[in-house]
Structures are given as structure tokens and as C-alpha cells.
Image (cartoon, rainbow, N blue to C red):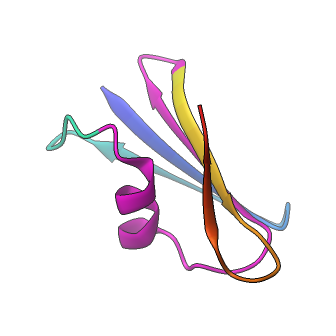
């Protein structure tokens, strides 16, 4: 099962269980589930294995790290 974890400035942690998607496009998922604020970090996991992560920079651009 895929899990999307969104951490915002170390004060908020939200976890979404994604039963209905096989998508690896973390940027698209981040835009749907995230708030798009500076400091937001998003992790995509599948059965507790990290698939990808991305974050917003101070210019509000989304970056992806694999």
C-alpha cells in the first residue's frame, strides 16, 4: 500500500493511505495533498520503502529527489 507523508515545518505531520493509485509521480501527488508552503517535505512510500521525496523551496518551487 502506498503512503504519502507530508511534514510541514516540523510542526505538522499528515499521513495519507493511497489505496486508489499506483502513481509514482510525487510532484502531482504533492500538489493534490500538500498545502504548497515553504518548508513542506513530502515522502512517498510503498510498504515502508521510500519511493521518492520532494519539497518546496523558499521560492515556492517543487523539487523532486529520488
Front residue of 11/49: it is 49
Compared to residue 21, the image places residue 57 above or below, namely below
Quadrant of res 65: top right
Front residue of 19/36: it is 36
Number of marks: 0
Compared to residue 42, the image places residue 23 above or below, namely above
Residue at image location 84% in from the left, 68% down from the top: 9
Residue at image location 82% in from the left, 79% down from the top: 58
Quarter of the image that includes the N terminus? top left
Residue at image location 80% in from the left, 69% down from the top: 39
Q: Position of residue 27 (x, y in %)?
A: 44, 57
Quadrant of res 55: bottom right
Given the current orientation, which residue lies at the most extreme left position?
20
Q: Is residue 27 magenta?
A: yes
The magenta region covers: 24-49
Q: Is residue 17 magenta?
A: no
Front residue of 44/64: it is 64
Amino acid at each position: 500500500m502506498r503512503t504519502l507523508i507530508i511534514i510541514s515545518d516540523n510542526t505538522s505531520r499528515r499521513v495519507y493511505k493511497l489505496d486508489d493509485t499506483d502513481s509514482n509521480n510525487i510532484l502531482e501527488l504533492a500538489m493534490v495533498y500538500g498545502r504548497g508552503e515553504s518548508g513542506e517535505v513530502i515522502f512517498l512510500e510503498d510498504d515502508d520503502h521510500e519511493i521518492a521525496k520532494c519539497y518546496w523551496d523558499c521560492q515556492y518551487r517543487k523539487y523532486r529527489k529520488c
